[in-house]
Structures are given as structure tokens and as C-alpha cells.
Image (cartoon, rainbow, N blue to C red):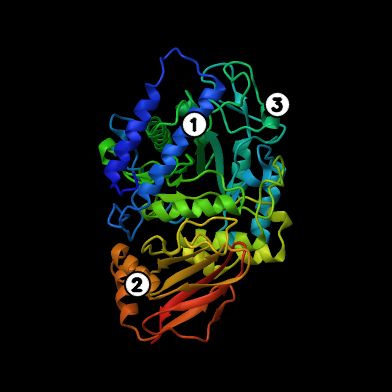
Amino acid sequence: GGGSLDLAQANRLLSARESNVHRAAPSDYKPTEAEMSEVRHLINRFDSLLYRAVSSLPLSSPSPVPVTSPPPPVKLTTAPGRLSRPLNNGLGWKPPMGYSTWNDCGSTPNSSWVRRTADYLLSSGLAELGWRQVNVDEGWMLGRGASPPHQPIEDRELFPEGMGALGVWLHGRGLGYGLYSSRGSKQCDRPEYRARCLHTPPNPASDCAGSLGHFKVDGEWIAAQGADYFKFDSCGAPDWSRSTAFGQYAEMRDVLNSTGRAIFFSLCGWQWWYAPPDPSRQYLGGGSLGNSFRVYKDGKDWAALSQAVNVMAVVGRWSRPGGWADPDLLIGPWCGIDRDQNFCGQTDLQARTQFSLWAIFPAPLLLSQNLLAWSDYAKETYSNREVIALNQQSHFVAPASRVAGSNLSYPCSAADVDGGCSNVWARPLSDVAFVLVFVNNAPQAANVACDHTCFGAAFARAAELGMGRGGEAIAATTARSSRLGVRDLWSHSDLPQTLSPPFHLEVSVAGAGGCRLLRISPLS
């Protein structure tokens, strides 16, 4: 009705929606595809309206509490009330950095390509900068065996050595190793994948097998291959209720913990509602299920990624060490093998803006693009030590927040009075400074400003979420300072102007998804 609501009310509305969806038809009724399409449309419309209402929640809603040391690993077991148990596996102290095959290879990854990309991470110096995780996404699994326990079968044409041997090879070079599956009956398979995967029992007749009904077998098998990282998707899920999703992810979380191997658990559920806690369900929030939790659908271009940025403006507050809100992968100018290149990709300028925002959120940094075809500009983008340092802080103060502008749209009109063409984001840092990202989605270059109200929001956010010499110190020191210095982290230069109260900073930003990334700190 256009009013505001609190988190408990939002959770009750979602529960009512799920209950009504489940009892809307007799259990033996089989709806047509047209009917299911209409149901999905109505559910998406409801979720969209609820999301917009939740976006107005005050900043006093449950927020992450900064910590100063990694949590100790705890061995968890499957048990009633598992949603009240934290993940707490001692991993994800910083967001992961590395490479994923998905937007590069689609459903057709192969050992040769993965090895060549890994070699490039090492030879280019990227691994030394932190880009060390190598994740094989969908497509490595041919199906599962006919005899119990129905273990996964690798595609030996694409990975002749087997997945365990590939892990040994990567580990021998000091790199991490990740694998993939989905919580549903099938994977997010593309046509060519469906044509080669197994369709004999117990595999699906027309799709490629997911993990549904085989969580324990698959989790233990993944651990046995030496995986350090496991992405668990949501394709083929039995339904889209939160109860089912939370329960399945908690089950796989507990399986992974029971293996005795430390595995970063990447929950890929594509919904914003994984992030906030739900006390009525004893649900502690996304960080209790996974070390990262996807909060939006695949970002195939800058238009979709702009929407992911909007979602992070709402749910980013629930990011913390050990459990990071994940707005999706870092994509390049095109998508590789087995992907529609006219439908997927972004400009180099937009890729730099994405990297700037993902760095300050902070979010997982996983390159999902053809690194072997990089331009010098792309290599310069992802080799920027100053930007990487924003993401990989040793002392976490607080996540970023949007302090000017409203929901981005792309393409947008420069006459948009609602602020959909520009944003300013702020994040307090751990050394009495903060960083601002100015974003411009208008077609042409434009001036984007952070006025005294914008600066005030940045200071207030630092004081609200910060601790110790972090956020509180930043807010207090900066508020008292008569002068602030400005450093451009892409040009690696200190700007000549200094800022004095009442603070106001206006900068020219390139259009069509351009950005400026500026570090603000008190001058002595």
C-alpha cells in the first residue's frame, strides 16, 4: 500500500505468499506451462513490491557486527533447528578472488582451458595480487552412476585426468580449486550440455543431473576431489519457497562441515531474501548458510548489473567477514564458448565501474571472462593494487552504502529526476579514511556531486556501523577536520583540490556506465 514495514512484517508477508502458493491447487493437479508461467509472473511481481518496501527499512535494522579476528572453525552436524546454527567454518575472512569458468565457457569448461587460464594468473602476476581461486562451474559432471551410491561421473572427454587430478595440479601451483552443482533435480544446463550428459536412470530423462536426493554423496565426493570452494546453484529446485531453500542449503552446509575438509560454501540462490535474518524461522541470515550468498540473478550486461547494484543498496548491510552478499561474477566485453555473444557482456569502462563497486561493497571478486584475450586496459583494471586493497582489508569496518541517488537504470535518460542515472556510494575504511564511488549511467559525461547531505550520510553510516578506530574514528576525525584530501585510485594521483566544511565534491564522470573512485582522508 505504499507504506513502510519492518523486517518482521516483511518476513511474515513472504511466509504468507509461500503458504498460499503451496495450497493454491490440489496436490494431484498438474498445471500447464502457461499456468505456471502466470504463477511465476505473479510471484515475481509480489517479490518486487515487497523488495521495494524492504528497501525503505531504516538503517537500525539488524546490521553486521564488525569483528577483528576470524571465527574458529566449528564442526557442525545435521540436526533439528539447523537454521539457528551459524556456518562458522573459519573461511571467507576476506571475499574470495579468482576465476570462474561460467561466463567464459558456459556449460563447456575443459581441462586444457582451465590450466591455460591458471597459468596466466601465475605468469601475469595476478595470482600474486590475490587472484588465486580457480572454479570450474557447470558442465564438468556427465551424470551419476547407475549403482548406489550414485556418485557423480566426470566428463572424461573434457577432463581426461578427472576432477581430483585437476585439483592436485592447481594446488601444486598454489591456487585454490572450486567445483559446482545445484540443489535441484537438474543443473542450469544449456542445450549442448543436455545433448551430452547422461539420461539413463537415475539421471533425468531430458536434463543434466543436479544434487537433489544426493546431497551427502555429492558433498563427500566434492571434498574427496580436494575442492576448497563449492558453488551450489538453485536450478531445478523442487519449489521456490524460503523454507525449502533455507533447509536445503543448511543440509549441504552441514554435509560439507562433516567431511572434515575446509570448503568455502558459495550459496547461489539469486534472491535478495537470503541476506536478512528471520527470527520467526530462527534464521540468522545469509552468513549462517554460506560464506557467500547470491542476492540477484545472473548479471549478463551492465543493465542487469545495475539492478544488482540496486539490490546491494538494500541487502549489503548484512555482509560481514565469513558471509558476503554476492551480486554475481565480474564479466568482460563478451561471454565465451556456448554463450550468445550479442546478449552477454559489457564495455571495458563498465567493467571498471563494476570492479570499483564490487571492491568497496565488498563482494566476491571472481573473474568470469576470457583472461587470455584481455586488452591492456582490462589487465590494468584488475591489477590495480589500490582497488584490490579496498576489498581485501585486514580489518573490516563496515560495508558500503549508497549515499546519493536512487535505483540505477540503464539505459537511462539524463532528465531522470529520480536519480536513476547516477549514484554515489561510500564506505568507511580502517585507517581514518573513506572511499567514494561516483557512477554515471547517463548517455554522456556528466558532473556527479556529493554535497554536504551526501557527506553527512557517509559520516553517519560510518558512526552507525563502525567500531573502535574504524567507523567511529573516521566519522569523528573527519567531522572535526577542516580539510580533506582527495585521491583518485584509477589515476593513482592526489587531486589538487582540498575539501572544507560544508563538504561538497563534484566530479566529471564518463557516461554510459562510467565511474570515479576517490579516497577521502583528513589532512594533517
Q: Residues within 10 Å of mark 3 (few under 14, many from 20)?
A: few
Image quadrant assignment for residue 477 = bottom left
From this viewpoint, is residue 97 visible? Answer: no
Q: Residues within 10 Å of mark 1 (few under 14, many from 20)?
A: few
Q: Earlier in the sequence, mark 1 or mark 3?
A: 1
Kindly identify which residue carries mark 2. Answer: 456
Does dot 2 land on a helix, a strand or a loop? helix
Q: Earlier in the sequence, mark 2 or mark 3?
A: 3
Q: Disc 2, disc 3: CB below 8 Å?
A: no
Between the residue at mark 2 and the residue at mark 3, the CA separation in whole angstroms equals 57 Å
From this viewpoint, is residue 333 visible? Answer: yes
Compare residues 12 and 225 and report the one nearer the observer.
12
x 60%, y 43%: residue? 168
Kindly identify which residue carries mark 3. Answer: 195
Q: Disc 1, disc 3: CB below 8 Å?
A: no
Residue 112 is situated, as x and y percent measured from the top left of the image, at 72, 44
Between the residue at mark 1 and the residue at mark 3, the CA separation in whole angstroms equals 27 Å
Kindly identify which residue carries mark 1. Answer: 40
Amino acid carrying mark 2 in the image? Gly
x 61%, y 47%: residue? 300
Amino acid carrying mark 3 in the image? Ala
x 38%, y 51%: residue? 55
Q: Earlier in the sequence, mark 2 or mark 1?
A: 1
Q: Residues within 10 Å of mark 2 (few under 14, many from 20)?
A: some
Count of marks overlaid on the render: 3
Side of 416 where 79 appears, left or right:
left
Image quadrant assignment for residue 317 = bottom left
Does dot 3 land on a helix, a strand or a loop? helix
Image quadrant assignment for residue 382 = bottom right
